[in-house]
Amino acid sequence: MPFRLGAAAAMAAISATLVLMIVKAVVAPPDSPDIAGREGFLLQHVATGLVAGLALQLGFRRFGLPGYAGGLAWGLGGFLAVVLVPWLILPLELPGAWPRDALGLLVWLFTVACTAAGLILLWPGRFPGMSRRSILLLAGGLLLLPSFVVSSLPESTALPADAGDPLVRLNTGLDFTPGATDIALGVELALALDLLFWLLLGLFSVLATRRLVLRQD
């Protein structure tokens, strides 16, 4: 069984990444060859997809295999937990990018864990032994906890990007240079591509479970 779960996670991760790379090449063709950038983008999404795909497989075994619409919902939850909420907590990091220092990475992992746990608690019917009020209070506390933790950190560690980076100037509102619009479009595109990736990962995870796991049970 562990091998089949890993195979399903790999199938979903590779499929989602391949479709993402095709879409990225169509909507944002590079002005100049950037092999290193493309390889980094590819490897990061494959690695993220493998870990997240395995987490989805374990989630499916614990809570039951959803339909394809449910797979999209799981993917949306992954996007919120791994991309959007951590980026709101660490706004000077690029959406979906792993933090570049140890403290930022710890904050990112803590945010992902708290957000994922909070979203799972909010999933209807998953915890029948708990009252609705208790679930809402616990989930709300988990979702808000990263913000309180980050607010207690020095700004230089909570927001670790280089102050000279134009992305920093854009997000802090300190400087709106002529290139700021291009940067904003880049951030929006990164968020859109990551959303697509996670939706695809949820969809392909359901498909991979049906083809590689349940078929052989």
Image: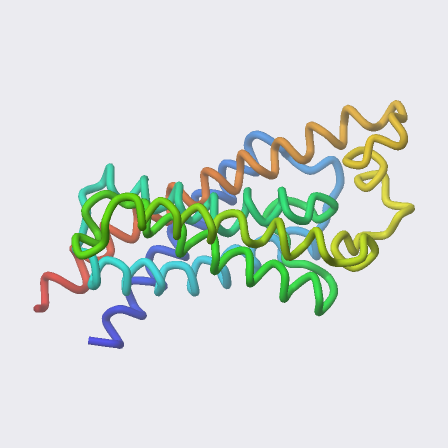
The one nearer the camera, 22 or 187, is 187
The C terminus, quarter of image: bottom left
**Residue 199, position as x, y percentages in the image:** 38, 41
Which residue is rendered at x = 69% and y = 28% of the image? 185
Q: Residue furthest bottom?
A: 2
Q: Count all numbered tags in the image, as a single digit.
A: 0
Q: Say above or below: 138 vs 101.
A: above
**Residue 151, position as x, y percentages in the image:** 70, 51
**Residue 154, position as x, y percentages in the image:** 80, 57
Q: Quadrant of residue 77?
A: top left
The N terminus, quarter of image: bottom left
Which residue is rendered at x = 68% and y = 54% of the image? 150
The one nearer the camera, 79 or 114, is 114
Residue 30 shown left or right of residue 206 in the figure: right
Q: Say above or below: 176 vs 163.
A: above
Residue 127 shown left or right of residue 144 in the figure: left
**Residue 118, position as x, y percentages in the image:** 40, 51
The one nearer the camera, 91 or 17, is 91
Residue 31 shown left or right of residue 146 in the figure: right
Residue 217 shown left or right of residue 106 in the figure: left
Colour setup of the view: rainbow
Q: Say above or below: 80 vs 31.
A: below
